[in-house]
Amino acid sequence: MNPITMIVINWVKPGCEAEYRRCVEPVLDAMRHEITFVNTILHQDAEDPTRFMLYETWADHDDFFVKQMKKSYRSEYERILPSLLRVPREISFFEALRADFNFYA
């Protein structure tokens, strides 16, 4: 397996923040049950509420692109997303070199 981490930036149109969350959250809820899913974090910019970032890690690069991107639970999100965005989404791919965590209460 070849793990992959993605950072996805979505700049939504002003006033579409709640609609974006209504579209993306069911996808996040569904993908956590996939066998190659590792983690995801949805962020909203503290200074610009129209800017969202998804930090997403999958255990297998090929599985993500061959299988996960074609899952039915993603189809509605992929269909609606362009109408919510003011610019095309930005996607960057990373390979982990080190991971440090501190799980606090």
Image (tube, rainbow, N blue to C red):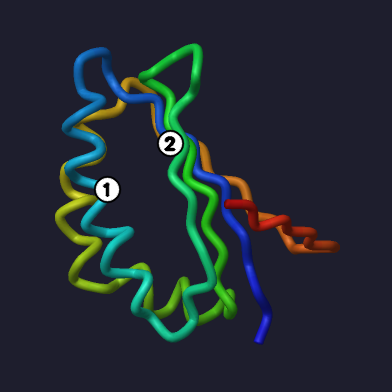
Q: Which residue: 20% across, 29% down?
A: 18
Give residue 77's mark: none
Q: Position of residue 11 (x, y in %)?
A: 39, 25
Q: Position of residue 56 (x, y in %)?
A: 52, 57
Q: Quadrant of the N terminus?
A: bottom right
Q: Which residue: 47% across, 37% down?
A: 43
Q: Quadrant of residue 66?
A: bottom left
Farthest residue, direction right? 97
Give residue 24's mark: 1
Between 100 and 7, the residue placed more toward the observer is 100
Q: Which residue: 32% across, 24% down?
A: 12
Q: Which residue: 54% across, 79% down?
A: 62
Q: Position of residue 13 (x, y in %)?
A: 27, 18
Q: Residues within 10 Å of mark 1 (few under 14, many from 20)?
A: some
Farthest residue, direction front? 105
Identified by mark 1, the residue type is Val
Q: Residues within 10 Å of mark 2 (few under 14, many from 20)?
A: some
What residue sits right under mark 2 in the picture?
89
Question: Do residues under tags 2 and 1 come within 8 Å of each other at their CB atoms?
Answer: no
Judge from the rendering whether residue 12 lies leftward or rightward of residue 9; answer left or right. left
Q: Position of residue 44 (x, y in %)?
A: 44, 29
Q: Quadrant of residue 17?
A: top left
Q: How many marks?
A: 2
Between 42 and 74, the residue placed more toward the observer is 42
- Which numbered disc flags the more N-terminal residue, 2 or 1? 1
Identified by mark 2, the residue type is Arg
Q: Is residue 19 above or below residue 54?
A: above
